[in-house]
Amino acid sequence: MAFTYKGVRQAFRWCEPGTFLMGSPENEPERESFGNDETQHQVTLTKGFWIADTTVTQALWEVVMGDNPSHFKGEELPVEKINWKEAQAFIAKMNGLKAELKLCLPTEAQWEYACRAASTAPFCWGDQIDSTMVNFDGNYPYNNGSPSEYREQTIAVKELYCNDWGLYQMHGNVWEWCQDRVGDYPAEPVIDPQGPESGDSRVLRGGSWDRHGRYCRSAHRSLHDPSYRYDSFGFRLVRGHELQSVRSVRAGQQPAGSHAGGARGGQTGDGLRGGKEPKGMLDRFKDLMK
């Protein structure tokens, strides 16, 4: 699924309902032993969701908001220096233009579910990363890995590999704001968690271009005041559930290691998988912002 606004296109991937282990096992190398809780627990998401295949680009931010606050400039680079409140302002403006979009930030559980793409390892591809896979400070590799390139800035949102569900750079490049406030995890299984109802700080996920490898793990959690901005803070969009019956795209159908720009899984040029799609609602979705 995708929308186009003033010539800028944003594609989304479908994540089916499912159950996964959120957080990290106690024996995961370099897991958080203090600070933000990573207690591993079972999470069930009862509703599927559409999640953007990339973080919001500077091109999309500019056509919607009319400015570009980013430190590193480039249309296909992620917009950064965005705080949580500004991400919400962008979302409100988009939804004001077309209420059918029903955009929001992902919950922390949605984010980790999509990032892992069914993996239980520290990263969606396995136990180790380097700078050919993730944009991070390669001078500080994960778990005694070999040093690799430190680019010292953001890169284009599709420059590196996507995960098995077609989502780009959920590890590294920029931290991604989530909807949730920060809180400790429960030990028992939970359903559709939304985070604490009160608290000041909001969750950021994924690590960034200037952070060590350990911070890019699927389970790592960061936090900041919602008014704080930095040149490694961006965000990714999620759509509401109302269109989930339009097309049942099963998560995990993409081949592992799909690369930016490559054809994947019979996908068409419109970001839809091959085969017939329902008429009417799907056509309206594709044209929402044109």
Image (cartoon, rainbow, N blue to C red):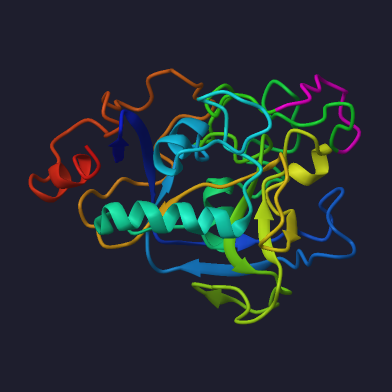
Q: Nearer the viewer, residue 13 or 80?
A: 80
- Residue 160: horizontal and vertical position, in percent? 59, 24
Q: Residue furthest left?
A: 280
Q: Tell me if 189 is positioned left or right of 144 in this view.
A: left
Q: Nearer the viewer, residue 118 or 133?
A: 133
Asked if 207 appears above or below 17 in the picture, the reply is above
Q: Residue at x 51, y 47 (%)?
A: 236
Q: Tell me if 247 is positioned left or right of 167 in this view.
A: left
- Residue 252: horizontal and vertical position, in percent? 44, 42
- Residue 157: horizontal and vertical position, in percent? 55, 29
Asked if 142 appears above or below 106 in the picture, the reply is above
Q: Tell me if 143 is positioned left or right of 246 in this view.
A: right
Q: Tell me if 35 is positioned left or right of 223 in this view.
A: right
Asked if 167 appears above or below 149 in the picture, the reply is below
Q: Nearer the viewer, residue 154 or 17?
A: 154
- Residue 52: horizontal and vertical position, in percent? 44, 43
- Quadrant into which the C terminus falls: top left
Q: Residue at x 69, y 20 (%)?
A: 132
Residue 105 visible (yes or no):
no
Quarter of image, res 174: top right
The image shows a total of numbered marks equal to 0
Q: Is residue 222 magenta?
A: no
> What segment carries the magenta color?
143-153
Magenta segment, prevailing SS (helix, strand or loop): loop
Quarter of image, res 31: bottom right
Residue 125 visible (yes or no):
yes
Q: Residue at x 88, y 38 (%)?
A: 143
Q: Residue furthest front?
A: 66
- Quadrant into which the N terminus falls: top left
